[in-house]
Amino acid sequence: MLLIEELQVEVGGKRILSNVNMEIPEGETHLLFGPNGSGKTSLMMTIMGFSGYTVTHGRIVFKGVDITHMPIDERARMGIGVSVQRPPTINGLKTRDLVNVCAKQSGRTIDIERLAAEVNFSSFLDRDVNHKFSGGEIKRSELLQLKAQDPDLVLLDEPESGVDLENMALIGETINSLLHRGVTYMKGKSHRATIAERSKSALIITHTGHILDYITADKGQVLYNGVLCCTRNAREILKWIGEYGYEECVRCQMEMLT
């Protein structure tokens, strides 16, 4: 689904990502850990194609197509969706209209009332986008837009940030639904989709790891000072960071390399 090779990125002439290599197969969800300022959001913005993030080396391949220098709108049409941590307020644009645009651009016909009800957002549809929304309301708005777009690769920047516990369960449930990782019930039996049965992939940025209480990740990775320094089980990484800190992840990786 996503292949990143030897990626180097600069912002304002300063290098912020160095030799990043990453592969996310179809149907897998990967968590990206790292302290503040480590380059996690910059990596996500680069994958999505936001301006200001200059790729100086390497490439980004999505579904077999090199998208390294592709415009952001073309990446979205190909099937990449993003939820940023602090989306802007858009005065004069109703959330309902924005959600309908997301669906139209992906060629889908949606039942917007049903989708909004699924994320407890019905009463916000006719309000301006993010105008005086709380943290949880902003996250639900972003996820509603993603549900309308139905992307193949979902990029989520700290979905647990600014969300209370009551909303967090709904956020987790919605993410699982987006990624086709939820439990289905047929004839009294429950079934959780296997990787072979899933087609959606995700890269989820987390600082605290709390999102793991609500979703299941196939793999975890650590980004530290712009360098991807660890790849293994997400819960193992979270436990290790909690006990020893991020610096120990770097030391461990250096020992493996030597």
Image: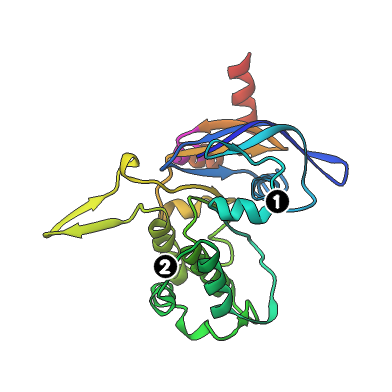
The spot of residue 141 in percent (x, y) is 54, 72
Give the amino acid type for the residue marked by disc 1 in the picture.
Pro
Q: Residue furthest right?
A: 13
Q: Residues within 10 Å of mark 1 (few under 14, many from 20)?
A: few
Distance from Cα at disc 2 to Cα at disc 1? 32 Å
Residue in the image at 65% along x and 41% along y: 67
Q: Is residue 234 magenta?
A: yes
Residue in the image at 60% along x and 78% along y: 133
Q: Which residue is mark 1?
A: 71
User: Which circle's residue, 2 or 1, is located before the other in the chain?
Assistant: 1
Give the amino acid type for the residue marked by disc 2 in the picture.
Leu
Q: Residues within 10 Å of mark 2 (few under 14, many from 20)?
A: some
Q: Which mark is residue 170?
A: 2
In the image shown, does 206 or 24 lie closer to the viewer? Answer: 24
Residue in the image at 52% along x and 40% along y: 63
Q: Residue furthest front?
A: 107
Q: Describe the element under mark 1 as helix, strand or loop.
A: loop
In the image shown, does 114 or 124 lie closer to the viewer? Answer: 114
